[in-house]
Image: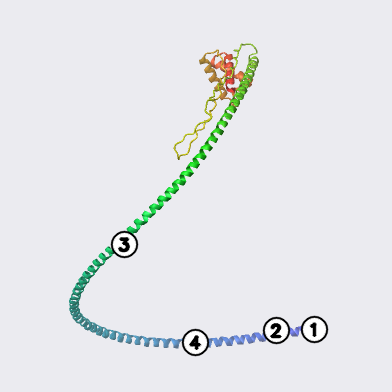
Amino acid sequence: MASLMQGFAEARQRRLQERANFLAEQQLARQEREKALQAQSEATAVYLAHAEQTRLAWEQGRQAIAENALASRQEELQNRASQVSQYLQDLNSNRVQQATEDSEERAQEVRTRTFKTRSQLKHIHKARIRTGKADRDQRQQLTQERAAFTQMQIEDINKARLASAKAAAEQRSQEVQARTAEVSAQIQATTEQRLAQAKQDAVSRAKEFSDRVANVKTSLEQLEATRLAEAQAQATKLNDFRANLSASVWSGSRSVAAPQPIAKVSANNTYDNSASLSPKPKKKGSKSESVVVAPEPEVAKPVNLEPPKEAPKETPKASSKIEQFVVDYVAQLSTNSSLLEVVNDRDTVRDLLAQGANTLKVDPSDILNTLLQMAEGSST
């Protein structure tokens, strides 16, 4: 154990010694680097000073050279400017002189060309006049020849057209005659066929008319009998209802006007059976179609139902007031009831009679009679 601790101590001592040696070496290396950097800085400063002096000297020499070159260029520019000015003056004078000469030459040339052109135009004009006259004479001759030839052709064409028209007219005349005969035969056959058909139709329509008249008579008789029975039954029901209503409302305390019996329904039906059942057809012409006039069935007159008439006991003025009051009362009801529904409701009838008696100052029995009459009229 002691040897192990001693070994650790020796190893530690060696490491410390090595660290101290390393630090010493690093310190020496650092000092050497600082010395080298110092020497390099001094050498750089010396070099920069020498370079600055060299640059200043070179700059001064370059500036002197530039000043000399500028002076020489200015002198050269002045010389060239004077030379160019002299050259331009000479050139301008030469151009003016040359332009004058050229203008005179062009004027002379224009005069010469104008004279030549006029001479040529005169010759061309004379030649055109001669050519135009010859062409006009030739065209006139050609036109006369063409007119004569055209006239001959027109005459030949007219002759051919006249011959063709004559032949076509004869052919059309023959065709018209043939077609006329054929159409006449067809019209005759059609007319005979239509006459036969018209006779058959007239007979059938007459038979149908008589059957319809018989059916209408039977229907009207049945309708009249049915309406009479219904009116009688309705009148009986209304009389019974009036009696019951009067008894229930007034309990026999007041007298109610006796209802009048409903008049019987009368129907006056007149029929005209004297119509001819075999009408004769009328002809307009030999080629026109025959028109057959068939008898029209007569419409039966409607049955006139006479409403029941009752002899009112009150005056017409009072009756109209009562009717207007009843109509207004029924109209203001919220149930939108009819007169029959109002009559069937006893409470409504009592209220109506009470309000009418207080408002119109009339006998409630008159109001009741008017109400029943209006109900009967609305039911019929």
Identify the amino acid type marked 3: Gln
Disc 2 target residue? 16
Q: Residue placed at 35% from the left, 58% from the top?
A: 160
Mark 3 — residue? 153
Residue type marked 4: Thr
How packed mark 4 is, by other alpha carbons closer than 10 Å (few <14, some 14-19, many 20 or more), is: few
Image point 42% across, 48% down: which residue?
Answer: 177
CA–CA distance between discs 1 and 2?
Answer: 18 Å
- In what element is the residue under mark 1? helix
The numbered disc on residue 4 is 1
Give the quarter of the image for residue 35. bottom right
Sort mark 2 into few (<14), some (14-19) or many (20+) by Cα contacts within 10 Å: few
Amino acid type, callout 1? Leu
Q: Specify the label residue 44 is tagged with.
A: 4
Question: From what the image shows, is residue 151 above or below residue 346?
Answer: below
Mark 1 surroundings: few (<14), some (14-19) or many (≥20) residues within 10 A:
few
The answer for how far apart the CA atoms under marks 4 and 2 are is: 42 Å
Front tag of 2 and 3: 3
